Structures are given as C-alpha cells and as structure tokens.
Amino acid sequence: MDTIASLFSFITTPVSWVIVQFHSVYGAIFGPDTGWAWGLSIVSLVVLIRICLIPLFVKQIKATRAMQTLQPEMKKIQERYKNDKQRQSEEMMKLYKESGTNPLSSCLPILAQSPFFFALYHVLNGIASGTTIGVINQGLLESAQKAHIFGAPLAAKFFSSESQLASLNASQTHVRIVTAVMIVLMSASQFYTQRQLMTKNVDTTVKTPFMQQQKMLMYVFPVMFAVFGVNFPVGVLVYWLTTNVWTMGQQMYVIRNNPTPGSKAQAAYLERLTKHVTHHGKARKRSERTIIKAIVAKGRDRNEFERKFINGLTKAGLVAQADGAVVKGEAQAAQTEDGVAAAGAAKRQQPKRQTKAQRQSGSAKAADEPSTAAEKEDSSEPTTSLEKSDEPQDAKPAAQQPSKGGSNGRSRAQSGQRKGGPQRPKSPSKK
C-alpha cells in the first residue's frame, strides 16, 4: 500500500486540506473532537468530489445511450458469428471503432474517484498510526484520534487488535459490529444500484458483451467491497457508503427523468407524461418537450411505448408537433405513423356483416342483371321479334320473364330443362 500511496501522494495534500477546512466549519458547531465534525467532513468531501465528477457522469450516460443504440447491430453480429467467437469479437471491436463508443466508459466515475480514495485512505491510515500527513498537524491528529463514529474510532479497522483499539478508547466488539454493518450497507447499496440499472433501464433480451459486462459488475463490485472492506478504516467506509448512496440517488433521478428508449423505465415515464400532458393540455417543461420532439422525429421507427404515447395523445384530442409542443386538435384529427397531424381525416367505416341468405340473394341478383338489362334493350328494338322467333319455344318464357324469386326462381328454371333437349342461352344479346 505504501507504493500506491506514493503514486497518489500528489493529491494527498489537497484532500487533507479540504477535510481540514470542512472540519473547521463543523467543529465550530458540534465540537472539534467529535465524530460528527470529522464524519461530516468526510461526507462533505464526497459530495464535493461527486459534484466535480458530474461532467464525467453525463459522459457516462451518453456512452450508455450509444451502446443501447448499437444493440440491434450487436445482435446481428452475434447471430451471424455465433460459432466463431474470435470473429465475433473482432466485428464487435470494429463496430465500436466505427461508432466511436467504448464499453469501458461506464467505469469512468469509478476510475476518476480512485485517486481521491487512495489519498483519503493514506490520510486515515496516517491518523491510525499517529503520523502527520498533508496539512494535518499534531493537534488535528490527536483530535481525529479522539473522534468516534457510532462508538467506533475514525481510524479503526475490522481486524484492529485490542491493543490498538485500547489506545483509541474503543472495544473490539463494538468496532466490529459497526464496521460489519457499514460493509453490508455499502455492498447492498452497490448491488441495488447496479440491479436497478439492469432491470429498469436496459433491454435484457439482447445478449451482448456490454450486457454481460454490466451483469458481471452487478455481482463483482459488492463482493469486492465485502472482501476488501474489512481492511478499510471506518473513515474510508463512511466515504464509500456516502458515494454509493449518492450514486444510487443520482441514477434513480436519471432513470426516472431520462430513461433509455425501449426500457421499462421509459414505459413508466411515458405513462406519467401522458397523464401530465392530457391533464394540462400541453407540455409545460422543457425536458418534456425535448422527449416529445425526439419521439415525433422517429416517425415509423418508434418503439411500442412511444407509439402508445402518441395514440394516447390522439385519443385525448391532442397532437404532438415537430418542435415538441402539444396542441389541441379537431374532433376528427388523426395522427399518422410518421408524426404528421392529418386534420379532418375521416375514420374508415367497417362494412356491416351480411347473413348467408343476403349474400346468396345478392349474388343471384348480380348474375341476373345483365340478362334483364338485355331484355329491356331488346324489347325497345324492332328487330327483337325476329331474334325471338329463332329461339327454342321451351326456352322463350324463361328467357323473357325475370326471375321473381331470386336464386330460387332461377334454380327451378334450370332444373326444368331436359338433358337431351336444347339449352337456353344465357341472354338473347349474346345470340
């Protein structure tokens, strides 16, 4: 650990200076030798570091979004080269390079916190061993050694000996209980944060290396915290528990207000947005207009949840515009698939279902219409008598009289014909 501490010694002095500044503020309120003063100083250090890391967190979110958009292409590569793992990995790396994404971007906040973590560990280890470090002088060192957090000294560890704890005015049993509870809370918060990301904000049906990486981290990090946490001082446990709680809250906010497209979180968000927009009749927030603008721009490429959102607005008499605004439409306004409002578009009427007798009578009337029209036309011409004289006598009444009984009359006419006799033509005009 001395080698690692020497590598991060350039940041030890700034970290110790920040802790001392916060301690001067909280010491005036709670007392300089109390655990509240030193514990809140560490918590404030975490908050300050995480505020400075917000740009990296935004970059992490963008990288995660880019990985989500590449999942269909990843799935195609996985299916195409499912029997060749080496070729599959090469194609994946080629896809990452062409799109400019990096699967390791999700680890940026953790990597950025590493120097601060080792610097704080070095400072607290110096307090435990009675060594001044950074801007912490002998007076601050003695004050920090007297501070207890829930009865456990700031520099105590799970495996600290009884003699070491006796010099810090603490019992070994009390220290182990406090450190064990903090380790469990630290590991549980890390597991819940990663599980929340996997179950609500990603599509787990697509098996890609990125998804496998996230699933592996969900189980690896809690185990790492549980294994290495027994060697951390209480002050470092306070640091990691605070940063895990911050990460969990920050991720809950992002998942709730800016979910990944196609995830369960997006379905819940669009359901809330539908109720909010239909209640007020418009999109009131800028973030809401940004989401609606992105959905309208997708057109036919919308997913199931986005189509349901557009249909919900249409049923409420609202129309989403290309700029993200929502306006009231006419009573018969319809939303087309590509996001363009078509006012006054009449709904397609479904034809009434006919019975079997109606369909049969309708087909029979349609078959008799040409012969009836031809008979009416022949009756007005003078040459009709000549044409009628050429017809067979037994077929003349059936050809000239329209069938009054629909299909039943026609069937009786056909059944009265003899097999060997002359057949009645279909219509006089065709003769």
Image (spheres, rainbow, N blue to C red):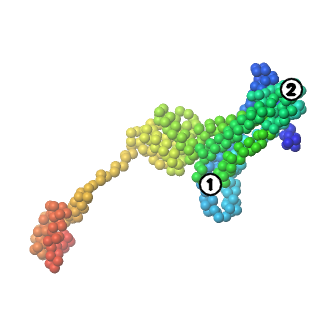
Q: Does the rendering let one see residue 294?
A: no
**Residue drawn at 60 percent across, 47 percent down:** 202
Q: Does the rendering let one see residue 72?
A: yes
Which kind of residue does numbered mark 1 sit on?
Lys
Q: Residues within 10 Å of mark 1 (few under 14, many from 20)?
A: few
Q: Secondary structure at mark 2?
A: helix
* Residue for badge 1: 207
Count every numbered label the image shows and give the total: 2
Disc assigned to residue 142? 2
Residue 164 lies, in percent from the top left, at 86, 33
**Residue drawn at 42 percent across, 44 percent down:** 334
The answer for how far apart the CA atoms under marks 1 and 2 are is 55 Å
Would residue 127 appear left or right of 208 to someone viewing this image?
A: right
- First in residue order: circle 1 vs circle 2: 2
Q: Is residue 397 above or below residue 132?
A: below
Residue 195 lies, in percent from the top left, at 64, 44
Would residue 33 appear left or right of 313 to someone viewing this image?
A: right
In-front residue for pair 163/40: 163
Residue 96 lies, in percent from the top left, at 68, 54
